[in-house]
Image (cartoon, rainbow, N blue to C red):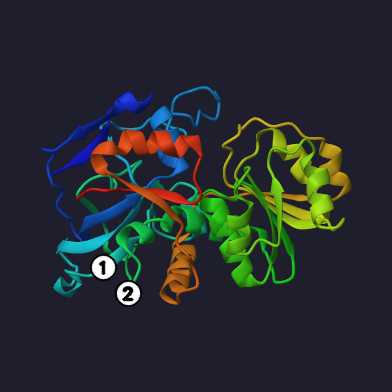
Amino acid sequence: MRAMLLTGFGGPEMLEYREDHPEPEPGPGEVRVRVGAAALNNTDIWTREGAYGSPDDPSASAGWRREPLAFPRIQGADVAGVVDQVGPGVPRERTGERVLVDPMLYEGGERELVDTEYLGSERDGGFAEYVTVPAGNAHPVDSPLSDAELATFPTAYTTAMRMLNRAGVRAGETLVVTGASGGVGSALIQLASIRGARVAAVVGTGKAERARELGAEWVVDRHTDDLAAALREAMSGRPAEVVADVVAGGSFGPLLRALGPLGRYVVAGAIAGPLVEADLRTVYLRQLTLVGSSFGTHEDFAEMVGHIRAGRLRPLLAGTHPLSELREAQRRFTSKDFFGKLAVVPGA
C-alpha cells in the first residue's frame, strides 16, 4: 500500500514515501479503515522533530509521551474513511461503515488518558491507504461532509472540548482564545459559542473576520505590543474568566494579567515556546487556577461527534494535498498562512 514513513527524528527529509508498504490486518476486536483523508496537527511536526523533550532534559529528542519512539512509524491521527475489514470478535455488519476515528488509544477513565497511546505516534496512523484501530475507536458518522472535512475534527476539536471541560467553561463567561486561526483555536471558538460563552479571539493579521464568522465577539491582533491591554480595551475593561491557550511563549504573562480574580488559565500547547516567564504574584494575589490539558477523553470525542451529527460544527478545511506531498503539506502547515486545517488524501 501507499504510505508515508517517518524514519527518525529530524526534518522533512525523515519522511519517506513508499508504495510497497505491507497492508495492516485487523487483530481481535479491531477494524481496518480504508483512509479517505487524514488531517495534519502540530503533534505531527513536534513528533517528527522530537521536540517534546524529556522530564529531565527539555532539549532531548522524544515523542509526545517524552520517551523514545519506535521507527519507522506512520503518522496521522485524524482519520476519516470506511471500514473495509473486521477482526475476530467484531460484527461483520460493521464492514462498509463510514467512520471517524478517535485517536486516543487507552482503556479506563480520564486518569489513563495521561499515559495513553496516540494514533500515529505509538501506533501506525492514517498517512497511508489503510489503518487498523480498536473497533470502539471507529465512530459511525452519517454526514454530508467530505472525508477531508470530517478529518479536520478529531484531535483539534476533542482537544478543545477537553480544555473547555477541564476549565469548566459556562454560559455567559468570557473566554480568551489564543491561536484562534488554527485547528484547536477555531474549534474553541465554535464549541465555546455553542455553550453560550463570549469569546475574545487572538489571531494573526488579516484573520479577524474569519474568527468573527465562527462566533468570536471580540478580536485582537496577536502582534500587538501589550496583549493584556489590547484585550482589556477590546472587551471595554471587562476581565476574562478563562484563558484557553495553545501558544504560550511570551504571551503567557500578559494572558494571566487579562484574567480577573479567580480566573482560570487552561493550556494545551506551546507553539510559541514551552519555557515561559510570569510574575507569580499575579497568580496568588488574584487566586488564579492554572490547568494543564492534553488531547481528549473518549467521552469528549463522543460529545464532539454528537455535535457533528447535529450539524452544529463547521469544518474549516484550508486545503488538501496528495499523500505523496506530505512534506509540502507540513511546510505549509508550519507557515501558518491559512485558517483552519490541512489534510492529505491517500487516493489522490
Q: On the rendered structure, is 310 left or right of 18?
A: right
* Residue beneath the point at 58% across and 47% down: 268
The quarter of the picture where residue 102 lies is: bottom left
Q: Residues within 10 Å of mark 1 (few under 14, many from 20)?
A: many
Image coords of residue 171 (percent x, y): 70, 72
Image coords of residue 63 (percent x, y): 42, 34
- Looking at the picture, which amino acid does disc 2 mark? Asp
Q: Is residue 165 visible?
A: no
The quarter of the picture where residue 197 lies is: bottom right
Q: Residue furthest toward the bottom?
A: 310
Query: Does label 2 or label 1 sit earlier along the sequence?
Result: 1
Image coords of residue 61 (percent x, y): 44, 25
- Looking at the picture, which amino acid does disc 1 mark? Arg
The residue that mark 2 highlights is: 142
Depth check: give the residue in front, 271 or 287: 271
Circle on res. 98: 1
Q: On the rendered structure, is 11 left or right of 235?
A: left
Image coords of residue 238 (percent x, y): 84, 58
Depth check: give the residue in front, 312 or 224: 224
Counting every numbered tag in the picture gives 2
* Residue beneath the point at 58% across and 63% down: 214
Proximity of marks 2 and 1: CB atoms separated by less than 8 Å: yes
Depth check: give the residue in front, 24 or 251: 251
Depth check: give the residue in front, 271 or 275: 271
Q: CA distance from mark 2 to mark 1?
A: 7 Å
Q: On the rendered structure, is 110 left or right of 170?
A: left
* Residue beneath the point at 65% across and 30% down: 275
Where the N terminus falls, by quadrant?
A: top left
Q: Secondary structure at mark 2?
A: loop
Q: Secondary structure at mark 1?
A: strand
Circle on res. 294: none
